Image (cartoon, grey):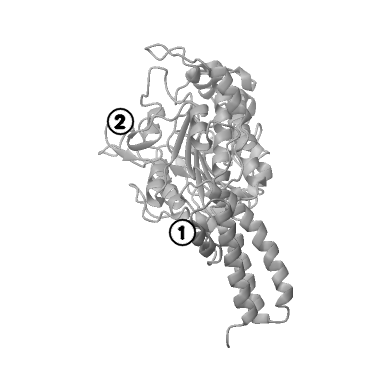
Amino acid sequence: MPENVFLTRAARRIERRMFLKAMGLGAAVPVAMRLARVATAAPSAAPKRFFVFYTPHGTAPEHYAPKIPNDNYDPTKAVTFNQFDLDQTNVSILGPLQPYKQWVNVYQGFQYPGVAGTHEGIVDCLSGLTNSDGSGATDTTTPRTSIDQLIAKALNVNPLILGACSHQTFGLDNHGMLFWNGTPIDPQKSPVVAADALFGSSKTTTPSADVQLHSDLLAFTASEIQTMKGTLNGLTREQSKLNTYLTSIQSLQASSSAMNGQNVCTTTPSLPTVEMVRSASAGNKPDSSGANDYFYEEANFPLLLQAQLEIVAQALICNVAPIIGLMPMFATCEFDFGFAGAPGSHHSDLSHSGYQASSGAQYNSPITVNNLMAAARTPFATAQKWFTTQLVNKVVSLLATTDDPAAPGTKVLDNTIIFWMSEVGDGNDHNRVSEILYPQVPDSVPLVTIGGGAGALNTGLVVRYPIAMSASASGVNRMVPDLLLTLATAMGAGSVTLPHTTGVVSEVLA
């Protein structure tokens, strides 16, 4: 069938108007021509973002585990549940995520490679590396690469690594070595420095010509084509082609920058908490030993974490940092959590508080977290829930309700994977495996993902693998590197390899 003259004229008109619009915004001729071509090209996939969020000292299963209806826990079976609640387990550490559980996966029955070592195991959590004999996790000299860096390398982007009091004032030791790129990475301690690098130091910074052009063209061409549809009414094939143009133009922003960290926002984001830190930390001058550093002082920790999370949310929304890691506090940190309603040092007092059996619980009771007395560790659970609340309030809620500027028709959380983890399982038990605690309490290393990864992940699931008594748990658990490999695959980084893997977790890959 000969090409319809109306369609041909419409297409040329669109491209010419795009070209002139680009020139009017100051784009060079080659850039204007490229943007005109891109806007009428086939739509590309939505950009994906990846965020690793660490919380120290594990959890308390009697305040953490999702409640699953009619759960007759069988520790020998692998099973996946799509019916669960996150806010019905005592203090409910995961409770703030309940409104967003359609995006949430909770993973049970996983373990870190190497059963020796406790908090020091942080050095291997994201790389899967263990000592040559398979034991321990205290070697800090062998080069390794954490999953955030592996994904970033595979996708050719620069990761952003942030910290909030992420190591001792004197410097980085093995309790702060979570992120690695051959050698351990010292996270950026200042949200002010991070914000200025990402968005510019001026709150009135104007968007680039390309960014403004994307926004203007998106609105202009949609209106233009709607008008043209009337002209082509009744020409079914031509209408179909023109609708393809419309879809392509609406995907303009995604087409121009899927993962390269180009800002897709047309305005500079508001960062009020960062500005609070800017004012409070002005003139910060630590001494030669690292003492008196605003960014490592206990009293400033809550505000610093909130400011860093504020940056994370806006960096993901604007796609200026599609791969991010954030480490709040270092393993063994002793900060007093009185500010969160849980007085006592987070490590020694709270996480080390011992679990206690509920009345009547025995060695042969049915397996359930109800076999532990909730009151015994309410303060620890309260402290850990504070982290969840900050993550939800500052990041999850925004991503879930913000239209993705790089992928019209979706929310940012649809195209993001948040990986939330800790270095140990039960805070007092210091286990790096998922096991049955006495009396008959299932305890898993806390691992959670939030977000769909642009449709790459099945979400709204509890994914459970077998666990056993501590003496045999390491022989039945699924390895955490399998989950890391799965997340890399979901992110489109299929070339990533990790030690101690047997394959992806197929249940969660769409």
> Which residue has dot 1 on it?
30
**24 lies above or below 284:** below
Q: If you read the primary sequence from the N terminus, does the residue marked by circle 1 or circle 2 appear first?
A: 1
**Residue furthest left in the image:** 132
* Amino acid type at mark 2: Thr
Tag shown at residue 140: 2
Q: Secondary structure at mark 2?
A: loop
In the image, which is nearer the foreground, mark 1 or mark 2?
Answer: 1
Tag shown at residue 57: none
Front in this rendered view, residue 256 or 449 = 256
Residue 506 vs residue 66: left or right?
left
* Amino acid type at mark 1: Pro
- Residue 8 lies, in percent from the top left, at 59, 77
- Residue 196 lies, in percent from the top left, at 51, 32
Q: Residues within 10 Å of mark 1 (few under 14, many from 20)?
A: few
Q: What residue is rendered at 37% in x and 53% in y?
A: 502
In contact (CB < 8 Å): disc 1 and disc 2:
no
Q: Is residue 84 visible?
A: no
- Residue 115 lies, in percent from the top left, at 37, 36
Q: Residues within 10 Å of mark 2 (few under 14, many from 20)?
A: some
- Residue 212 lies, in percent from the top left, at 59, 49
Q: What residue is rendered at 57% in x and 41% in y?
A: 367
Q: Quadrant of the N terminus?
A: bottom right
Q: Secondary structure at mark 1?
A: helix
Q: What residue is rendered at 65% in x and 46% in y?
A: 402
Q: CA distance from mark 1 to mark 2?
A: 50 Å
Residue 43 vs residue 142: left or right?
right
Front in this rendered view, residue 68 or 252 = 252
